[in-house]
Amino acid sequence: MLDIKVTLTQTPKQKPVDESALGFGRIFTDHMFLMDYELGVGWHNARIVPYGDFPIDPAAMVLHYGQAIFEGCKCYRTADNTLQLFRPKDNLARMSRSAERMCMPVLDEETALEGLKQLIRIDADWVPHREGTSLYIRPTMISTDVGLGVHASKKYCFFIILSPVGAYYKEGLKPVSIYVEDEYVRAVRGGVGFTKCAGNYAASILAGDIAEKKGFSQVLWLDGVEQKYVEEVGSMNMMFAYGNKIVTPKLNGSILPGITRDSVLKLAVQLGYEAEEKRLDVNEIFADAKSGKLTEAFGTGTAAVISPVGVLALRDEKVTLGDGGIGVISQKLYDTLTGIQYGRLEDRNGWILKL
Ligand code: COI
């Protein structure tokens, strides 16, 4: 397709003045990208238009049966003012994999990427400058067929919105505290845990809310069968360091195959650490944290970047990891990953797409 019609806004918004107060996902830029899909026609009507509401029929299938998937990636401003994306093609490819599982159409990834590049060029002044900030990109696909029969929709809308952001957690790079969820589960075998479907996040909100009221930032999900093996945190994948060895749960169909997770595993090996993907028993993790064998824990994600975990709580017990501060490996990986993303370090893996 690739033909993208552009309509520019006549009323540009005020850009955020204080970039230290951006937070996450609260402000949106002047434009958005959209394209439509119809069975028999394919993807069509690619367009960039002023950011704003769009009409949706109250009987649209997404509102009732939840065919909705999304992605998250970021655009960074380097010191010499180049704008660059980190692994955007991997995000779009993952969206197509989510789409297949949710019985939605595979994306026209070429047009989506071109639309994304054009959109960011138009809203380039919205990419923040301050250290640690970026332009968060949220590609989303929803079903738009009208009707209440439960079956695959024949019509879909794909859109991309952009948001200048700071840190996802209010703690920034300070360690977060995580509660191991042992009542509710996020995903089950044969389910949709590996997709970035909206329902996975909806299902996590109650446990997240309870954990927050107890003073924790997030919950750590266990497997849906034995409620024993570590899965992920919902907004990030989890990694644990034992000396120079990093371990992380093996992808099993119910964990999100994180792009930051994959990048960190590769960087860890390139930096000389050992990295292993395997099934991790939460009781062992907890015992190792108490004995001091487990030296660091951190989450990885586009929004979360690398987020050290200072405290882990399981039932009524709490354990402080290391000295409760950011560990040496977490800091090294953070510096290396963000060094590449912000153009301070050479990208030896072909992950950067300059605009
Ligand atoms: C991301 O890291 O991009 C995510 O999608 C996680 C979260 C903000 C829902």
Image (cartoon, helix red, strand yellow):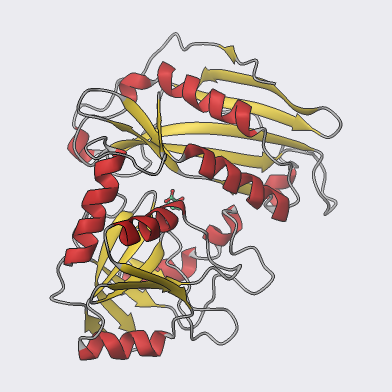
* Rendered location of residue 193, percent (x, y): 59, 64
- Residue 139 in picture, x, y percent from top left: 54, 38
Q: In which quarter of the image is the N terminus?
A: top right
Residue at the image point whose x is 72% and y is 36% from the top: 156
Whether residue 317 is visible = no
Q: Which of 67 and 100 lies nearest the eye of the viewer? A: 100
Quadrant in the rendering for residue 29: top left
Residue at 65% x, 74% y is: 189
Badge count:
0
Residue 342 found in image quarter: top left
Quadrant housing the C terminus: top left
Residue 257, image x, y percentages: 52, 59
Is 281 left, or right, of 308 in this rendering?
A: right
Residue 108 lies, with reference to residue 67, above or below; the image says: above
- Please say if 269 is above or below 97: below
Viewer-proximal residue among 48 and 51? 48
Residue 250 in the image: x percent, y percent?
50, 71
Answer whether residue 354 is visible to the viewer in this image: yes
Left or right: residue 228 compared with residue 19: right
Give whichever of 71, 20 is nearer the camera: 71
Residue 291 to residue 20: above or below:
below
In front: 66, or 257?
Answer: 257
Q: Residue at 82% across / 44% down in the picture?
A: 147
Q: Residue furthest top?
A: 10
Residue placed at 28% from the left, 88% from the top? 288
